[in-house]
Amino acid sequence: MVFSEVADRVWVARHEWYDVNVSVVAGDRGLVVVDTHGSAAAGRRVLDDVRRLGAGEVVAVVNTHAHFDHAFGNIAFREADPGVPIHAHEDAVASLSATSPADTAATWASGADDPRREEVLATEVVLPDHTFSSATVLDLGDRVLELVHPGPAHTAGDLVVLVPDAQVLLAGDLVEESGPPALGADSFPMQWPLSLDIVLGLTTGASTVVPGHGAVVDRDFVEVQRNELGIVAETIRDLAGRGVPVDEALATGEWPWDPRHLETAVRRGYEQLPRSQKRLPLI
C-alpha cells in the first residue's frame, strides 16, 4: 500500500482490509510507525512499504489501542528489530494480553474459508513494552510526538498522537471517517464525547486529523462526530432517567445513526450510568 504524505514528513497508508490507516512520522532520529495492521503477514507488508519510503529506520512503534487490526502486526517489527520499543497505553496492554488470535478470527471472520483467517491464526501477539497512564513524549531530535490518553472512549486504552510542528493529530479509532464510530463491547459511550473534547483541545482549525479508518479529516469533522456521540450519550441518559427499559431504548430514542449500529452502545451506556441517574422501568 502506497503511503501518502499528509503533512511535513507524516505519511498515511489507507489499507483495504478494514479500511484501516497506518501512519509514519519521521524525524532526525528515525521513523515512528503508528499502528501495524491486523496480522503478522499484514505487518510485514506494512514494514516493506515503510522501507520503500526510504525515509529512515524505524525507531519506535505505537499502538493507538488494543484491537487486532491496529496491533497484530507488531510481530513484524520485532522480527526486523528485536529491540524496537512498542508504545501503548497501559490499559491497552492489559486488553491485548487477553486477546488470542483464535478468538479474534472467530469473532470477525466471515467463515472458515475467509482468506484472512489463516493470517490471523498464524500471528503471534506481541505486547507493547513501553506504557504510560496519561501522557508521554517521543523525542525524534528535531521534533517531538506527544502521546495522550484522553480517557476511555472506543476502548479503555485509547491514545492519540500529536505532531505539534506539523499540526497533525493521529486519532486512532477515537475518530472514524468510513462509518459511524465503532461502539463495541469494550467501548465507553457515556465518556467518549468527553474524551473527544480533550482531543479537540489538541487541535486547531488548521489541523489535519488522521482517523483510525477512512479518509483524512479536519477539526470540523471531529467536532461533528463529537456532537453526534454526545447525542447518543444524552439520549441514553434521558431514556434511563425516565425509566425506559434498556430493551425498549432503541425503539424509543431518536438517534443520529441507524439504531442497529447502537444496540451494544445502549446496553453499555445503561450499564455505565450511575444508579442515581436511572429510574425503575416504567410500568
Image (cartoon, grey):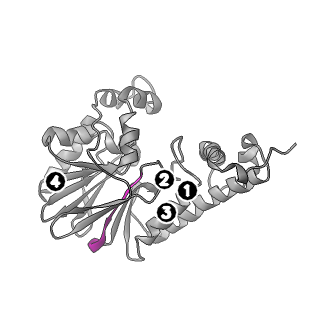
Look at the image and tell me in which quarter the C terminus lies. top right
**Mark pair 2, 1: CA separation:** 6 Å
Question: Is residue 256 something that shows in the picture?
Answer: no
Three-letter residue code for mark 4:
Val
Q: Which residue is mark 1?
A: 191
- How packed is label 3: few (under 14 Cα within 10 Å), some, or many (20 or more)? many
> From this viewpoint, which residue is outermost toward the top?
112
The tag earlier along the polypeptide, 2 or 3, is 2
Label 2 SS = loop
Q: Which mark is residue 196?
A: 3
Q: Does the magenta-highlighted stretch encompass residue 128?
A: no
51 on left or right of 218: left
Residue 241 placement (x, y as % from top left): 76, 54
Residue 276 placement (x, y as % from top left): 72, 52
136 on left or right of 92: left
**Residue located 26% across and 41% down the image:** 74
17 or 77: nearer the viewer: 77
32 or 7: nearer the viewer: 32
**Mark pair 3, 4: CA separation:** 29 Å
Q: Does the magenta-highlighted stretch encompass residue 161?
A: yes
The tag earlier along the polypeptide, 2 or 4, is 4
Question: Is residue 262 something that shows in the picture?
Answer: yes
Q: Which residue is mark 4?
A: 59
Three-letter residue code for mark 3:
Leu
Three-letter residue code for mark 1:
Gln
**Residue located 32% across and 43% down the image:** 71
Q: Which residue is mark 2?
A: 152
